[in-house]
Image (cartoon, grey):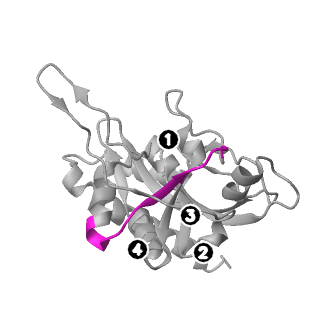
């Protein structure tokens, strides 16, 4: 989870060390009572891709260096989400990250272009972006309760698409939830079939997995296009 303090020291039988972590900056609200009182940020949750999608601080470091981006965050008193507990730690349920508006497109484009491969376990992880309307978490903290008058705000959340399942919010329901709950959906046939093709290839390595996967997905798109526009039998 994101904290002001540096990562805790870790120790094995040879060394004492600190895990690698990208610097992140806490948003200062001062007298603000809702997120719109501090303009210029896009608010989002990367929780799912960190918990279930093999996204890591190494990936984030590459993104930050590539775009000279800064990662901002805030941990709210009241939980925003349900379902992001990790080993009894519910911190992700309370936390949103924030991006300056002029950096947001670069950040989400880079995340969506990322695919992770677990070759020994024959799993792949791709990412998607959702938009949720929630009760403004800063206002909820200020009022300590959700009322009909509580302002609402749009945020984003990254979702995980893999060949073994999907982790995302159910956005088919239009009502605004007090605490949206992340759901484990069945994997899409597209990702199941793509993974079968990818991991059946001999000599697959991390270095060439992405290019092979990209070609598989392009082939699948071509087949889908041909089927869509195929002339009917006479």
Work out whether residue 230 can be spotted.
no
Query: Which residue is labeled 1 in the image?
Result: 164
Q: Secondary structure at mark 3?
A: strand
Q: Position of residue 64 (x, y in %)?
A: 31, 65
Q: Which residue is disc 2 drawn over?
A: 228
Question: Residue 35, relative to residue 196: is it above or below?
Answer: below
Residue at figure coordinates x 15%, y 19% from the top left: 13
Q: Tell whether 95 sits left or right of 196.
A: right
Q: Left or right: where does residue 53 sit relative to residue 182?
A: left
The residue segment tinted magenta is 65-79
Q: What's the CA distance linking mark 3 and mark 4?
A: 14 Å
- Which marked residue is nearer to the observer: mark 1 or mark 3? 3
Residue 148 shown left or right of residue 12 in the figure: right
> Of callouts 4 and 1, which one flags the residue occurring earlier in the amino acid sequence?
4
Is disc 2 placed on a helix, strand or loop? helix
The reply to whether discs 3 and 2 touch (Cβ–Cβ < 8 Å) is no
Task: Tell me the crowding category of disc 1: few under 14, some 14 to 19, or many 20 or more residues within 10 angstroms, Cα based.
Answer: some
Q: Is there any visible trace of residue 191 in the rendered image?
A: yes
Q: Which mark is residue 43?
A: 3
């Amino acid at each position: 989870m994101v904290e002001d303090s540096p990562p805790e020291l870790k120790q094995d039988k040879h060394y004492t060390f600190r895990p690698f972590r990208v610097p992140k900056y806490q948003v200062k609200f001062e007298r603000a009572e809702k997120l719109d009182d501090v303009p210029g940020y896009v608010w989002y949750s990367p929780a799912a891709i960190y918990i279930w999608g093999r996204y890591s601080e190494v990936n984030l470091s590459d993104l930050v260096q590539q775009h000279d981006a800064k990662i901002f965050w805030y941990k709210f008193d009241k939980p925003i989400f349900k379902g992001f507990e990790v080993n009894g730690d519910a911190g992700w349920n309370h936390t949103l990250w924030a991006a300056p508006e002029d950096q947001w497109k670069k950040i989400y484009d880079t995340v969506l272009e990322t695919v992770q491969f677990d070759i020994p376990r024959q799993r792949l992880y791709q990412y998607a972006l959702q938009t949720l309307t929630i009760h403004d978490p800063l206002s909820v903290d200020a009022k300590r309760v959700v009322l009909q008058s509580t302002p609402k705000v749009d945020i984003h959340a990254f979702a995980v698409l893999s060949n073994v399942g999907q982790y995302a919010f159910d956005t088919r329901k239009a009502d605004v939830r007090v605490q949206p709950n992340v759901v484990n959906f069945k994997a899409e046939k597209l990702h199941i079939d793509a993974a079968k093709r990818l991991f059946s290839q001999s000599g697959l390595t991390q270095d060439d997995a992405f290019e092979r996967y990209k070609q598989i997905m392009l082939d699948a798109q071509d087949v889908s296009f041909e089927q869509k526009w195929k002339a009917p039998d006479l």
